[in-house]
Amino acid sequence: MNFLESMLSFIFPPTCGICGKENKNYICSSCTEKLKKEKTYMPYIENYTEISHCYIFKYDGTIRKKILQYKFKDSAYLYKMFSEFFVKNEKVCRFLKNYDIIIPVPMTKKKISKRGYNQCELIAREIAINTKNLEYLKNILVKQKETNTQSTLNKKERLNNVKNAYKIQNVQKIKEKNIILFDDIYTTGATCIECAKTIINAGAKSVGLLTIAKDFQKIK
């Protein structure tokens, strides 16, 4: 921890991202138990033909509220709590050992300016800091066009909405590398699949997907 981070921790002590009580781990044991009782805490790895997907939660209950708060209510500080779920879970850490680089799903500059931060960047960077084998790369995968908000669209519209929306800026950085792509929520997979396809076509050896939560709601 550098001097600035030490000063900030002194002025703004670490707190549990759910109950708000001071806690150096950013999530207290009672709130962890609460999440488990809600049956949304379900660290799981799904293996598909081309992509393996690891997620921590079912997108429901308290964790759904916290993700929405993190994304839309100027709550960037919650990235510390979400990062803890990944770096303190043995199953996730074993999964991440298969990869060389972690890349966040990007946003356009216009959207970042409006929100103030890319929520995926903050968590992906923190995971890399706490995972020895992972290199964090920003601005390699970039979003080259504005798209409609995915949550307002049906499954077919989502696929069309993100088609050709991404590009790789520095192919040599990812060539023959195993890449982990980080996003916050997996719903239909349209965004993640389009990003993964872009990365593979640029010469990466493999792509895995890491998300906070999976939405089991059926999108028509």
Image: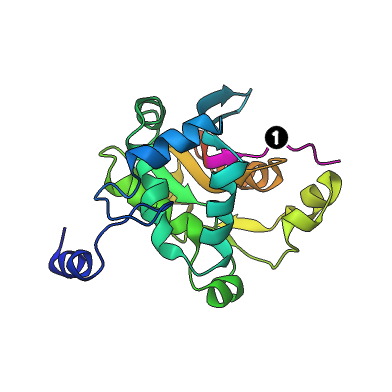
On the image, the x and y values in percent for residue 165 come to 68, 58
Query: Is residue 202 in view?
Result: no
Query: 203 or 82, which lies in front?
Result: 82
Residue at point 41% right, 30% down? 92
> Magenta part of the protein: which range?
212-220
Q: Residue at x 16, y 70 (%)?
A: 7
Nearest the viewer among 142 and 205 is 142
Task: Give the vertical position of 6 relative to 200 (above or below).
Answer: below
The one of 161 and 216 positioned closer to us in this rendering: 216
How far from the left and from the top, in percent, is residue 219?
81, 41
Q: Quadrant of residue 108?
A: bottom right
Magenta stretch: includes residue 210? no
| Colouring style | rainbow
Residue occupying image coordinates x 41% and y 27%: 95
Q: Position of residue 176 (x, y in %)?
A: 44, 36
> In the image as oriented, which residue stretches furthest toward the left?
3
The amino acid type found where label 1 is placed reads: Phe
Tally the marks: 1
Q: Which residue is labeled 1 in the image?
A: 216
Q: Main secondary structure of the magenta part?
A: loop
Say which quadrant the N terminus sits in.
bottom left
Looking at the rendered structure, the secondary structure element under dot 1 is loop
Q: Is residue 214 magenta?
A: yes
Residue 152 visible within the image: yes
